[in-house]
Amino acid sequence: IAGITQAPTSQILAAGRRMTLRCTQDMRHNAMYWYRQDLGLGLRLIHYSNTAGTTGKGEVPDGYSVSRANTDDFPLTLASAVPSQTSVYFCASSDRPGGSYNEQFFGPGTRLTVL
Amino acid sequence: GQNIDQPTEMTATEGAIVQINCTYQTSGFNGLFWYQQHAGEAPTFLSYNVLDGLEEKGRFSSFLSRSKGYSYLLLKELQMKDSASYLCAGMDSNYQLIWGAGTKLIIKP
């Protein structure tokens, strides 16, 4: 693994189904983030984690949950998917919050379609 | 509220210079980031400014004026590969990034 990876690359999901998007980084970064990107809107923060064992809510957390059991992994779960969750999801990591240390490195993204 | 404004789209000619502007309003301020995002790809870091002034990095430069809540990204000697979206993001007092919607830059030969 080099950098930050996400799985799956893309997914079509029926509404009401549960889905977990996976994110793994090998840079030993303390902070990790989940964003969604929709056409015409900026990246919007869903959840974040400043260090292993802690998580926080971002701008649009409803319908999503995260966990941070260790430094490397930060999965995002949609408990019961709805069509409005159709989006491109990016996972990112940074050395730690604050200043230039918050330069965020992004995974390749997961394109999710909820029908 | 927190807000980042940047133009939706700009067009420039190969070999020319283009300036992409960004105005920001954040709760507290801990710096301004610029990222590049090619279509269908992830954003990649270009620059970070926390002090007023111009930071030059090769063909790309970034400027910040904290008193005006304003930044710009300057791209010189444009190449076709510079066709991408350029994202401006302000870091607030909680060290969270507030993102603009991005400026799509179209380069014409």
Image (cartoon, coloured by chain):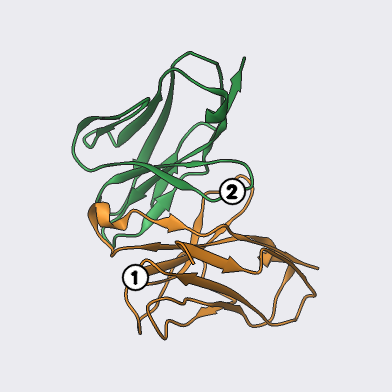
Chain colours: A orange, B green
**Chain where mark 1 sits:** A
Describe residue A20's horizontal placement relative to residue B65 as left or right: right
* Amino acid under disc 1: Arg
In 3D space, how far apart are the residues under numbered discs 1 and 2 (Cα atoms)?
23 Å
Q: Residue at x 46, y 83 (%)?
A: A67
The image quadrant of residue B45 is: top left
The image quadrant of residue B23 is: top left
- Residue A89 vertical position relative to residue A20 in the rendered view, above or below: above
- Residue B56 vertical position relative to residue B95 in the rendered view, above or below: above
The secondary element bearing badge 1 is classed as loop
Question: Which numbered dot is residue A28?
Answer: 1
* Amino acid under disc 2: Glu
Describe residue B6's horizontal placement relative to residue B108 as left or right: left
The one nearer the camera, B105 or A86, is B105
The secondary element bearing badge 2 is classed as loop
Q: State the quadrant of the C terminus of chain A.
A: bottom right
- Residue B14 vertical position relative to residue B25 in the rendered view, above or below: above
Task: Choose mark 1 or mark 2, whichever is in front.
Answer: 1
Residue B62, position in %: x, y? Answer: 32, 31
Question: Which numbered dot is residue B41?
Answer: 2
Residue A79, position in %: x, y? Answer: 64, 83
How many C-alpha atoms fall within 10 Å of the one at disc 2: few (<14), some, or many (≥20)? few
Q: Are marks 1 and 2 in contact (CB under 8 Å)?
A: no
Q: Residue at x 26, y 57 (%)?
A: A101
Residue A41, position in %: x, y? Answer: 57, 48
**Chain where mark 2 sits:** B
Describe residue B83's horizontal placement relative to residue A80 as left or right: left
The one nearer the camera, A50 or A79, is A50
